[in-house]
């Protein structure tokens, strides 16, 4: 399964400003790891984002967001954000900060 290199580049540039992230091919896409935890990634043209269960419920009320369910069963605390919700740098930065904020609450691996 291919993923959007353009979105991956945009994510990489933003995460590099905040100290960077390790990249791993995962789930047929590309995942960005912060402190050893998956923070976000790219699946096809969508942003895959780990935000935790509480923020995921709030995020699902926003346009262009759906549960992360690549196995057919939604994963708690994870969402997909479709391209229309990522068009501007401000929107993408906001989503990535939400993911990074959650990962920062986890103990380092």
Image (spheres, rainbow, N blue to C red):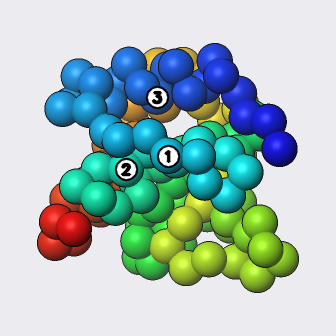
Residue of label 1: 24
Residue of label 2: 33
Report x, y in % for residue 64: 71, 46
The image's mark for residue 11 is 3
Q: Earlier in the sequence, mark 2 or mark 3?
A: 3
Measure the alpha-carbon separation of dots 2 and 3: 12 Å
Up the image or down, 56 lies above or below 96; here it is below
Measure the alpha-carbon separation of dots 3 and 1: 14 Å
Choose between 38 and 79: the one closer to the eye: 38
The image's mark for residue 106 is none
Question: Which quadrant holds the C terminus?
Answer: bottom left
Q: Residue at x 18, y 32 (%)?
A: 19
The crowd level at tag 1 (other Cα within 10 Å; few <14, some 14-19, many 20+) is: few
- What is the residue that sits farthest to the front in this orientation? 25
Choose between 48 and 38: the one closer to the eye: 38
Say whether residue 45 is left or right of residue 87.
right
Measure the alpha-carbon separation of dots 1 and 2: 7 Å
């Amino acid at each position: 399964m291919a993923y959007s290199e353009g979105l991956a580049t945009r994510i990489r540039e933003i995460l590099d400003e905040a100290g960077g992230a390790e990249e791993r091919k995962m789930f047929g896409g590309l995942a960005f790891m912060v402190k050893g935890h998956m923070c976000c990634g790219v699946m096809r043209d969508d942003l895959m984002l780990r935000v935790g269960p509480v923020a995921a419920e709030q995020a699902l009320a926003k346009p262009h967001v759906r549960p992360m369910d690549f196995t057919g069963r939604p994963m708690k605390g994870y969402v997909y954000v479709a391209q229309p919700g990522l068009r501007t740098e401000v929107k993408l930065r906001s989503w990535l900060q939400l993911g990074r904020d959650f990962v920062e609450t986890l103990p380092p691996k």
